[in-house]
Image (spheres, grey):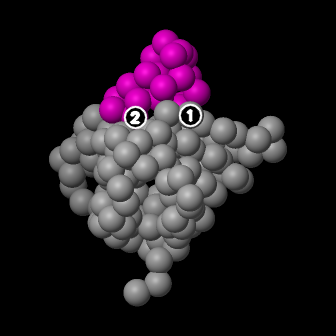
Amino acid sequence: MKTWYSICALNDGAEISIYDEIGAYGVSAKAFLADLGKLPDKAPLTLRLNSPGGSVFDAVAIYNALQRHAGMVTVSIDGIAASAASYIAMAGDEIIMPENAFLMIHDPSGMVMGTASDMRSMAEALDKIGASLLRGYAAKSGKPEKDIVQLMA
């Protein structure tokens, strides 16, 4: 199976590159976590990101796995960390972003087909997801949630 990320052992730690979509058609959380689990617990990691985003649930799982990692996690945004990938970036103990790189956050979106009840359920789910992402962005940036809400809109 072809993966769209790579993990490279270094003298001191490892470098992980995610240069694709997050989720089913790119980097799945299941595969990423299986490979991350093979690294030493306290190994310092450098995560290189260049991703348009994708599945918020895969991103949350990858974020949580990186948060659990006992070693230092440095995130380098090499090109773009958009949408779900921007949330993964928040897992870094340190975030490095060159002046010409991009970080893009937004309110979560989704598609639904069905009844008015189905659509209300989707709206409620999106509100819950958005509130969770909001807390993560605010905690990492140190900015008040009201400021992050405006940035996500």
Residue 54 location in percent, x, y? 47, 58
Is label 1 in a helix, a strand or a loop? Answer: strand
Q: Decide: is 98 above or below 48.
A: above
* Distance of label 2 from label 1 (alpha carbons): 19 Å
Q: Residue furthest bottom?
A: 1
Q: Is residue 83 left or right of residue 62?
A: right
Q: Is residue 123 left or right of residue 15?
A: left
Mark 2 crowdedness (10 Å alpha carbons): few <14, some 14-19, many ≥20? many
Residue 80 location in percent, x, y? 66, 51
Tell me if I can see residue 106 in this picture.
no
Residue 149 location in percent, x, y? 49, 23
Q: Residue furthest front?
A: 11
Residue kind at label 1, given as amino acid type? Glu
Q: Which circle's residue, 2 or 1, is located before the other in the chain?
A: 1
- Is 139 in front, or is 48? 48
Q: Main secondary structure of the magenta part?
A: helix
Q: Which residues are magenta?
A: 131-153
Tell me if I can see residue 59 in this picture.
yes
- Residue identifier under label 2: 133
* Contact flag, marks 2 and 1 (Cβ < 8 Å): no
Q: Could you tell me how many numbered marks the image carries?
A: 2
Q: Is residue 61 magenta?
A: no
Q: Residue furthest left?
A: 117
Residue kind at label 2, given as amino acid type? Leu
- Residue identifier under label 1: 94
Residue 127 location in percent, x, y? 32, 34
Between disc 2 and disc 1, the foreground one is 1
- Image point 71% across, 53% down: which residue? 79
Q: Decide: is 141 above or below 115.
A: above
- Image point 46% across, 61% down: which residue? 22
For the N terminus, give its image quadrant.
Answer: bottom left
- Image point 76% across, 41% down: which residue? 98
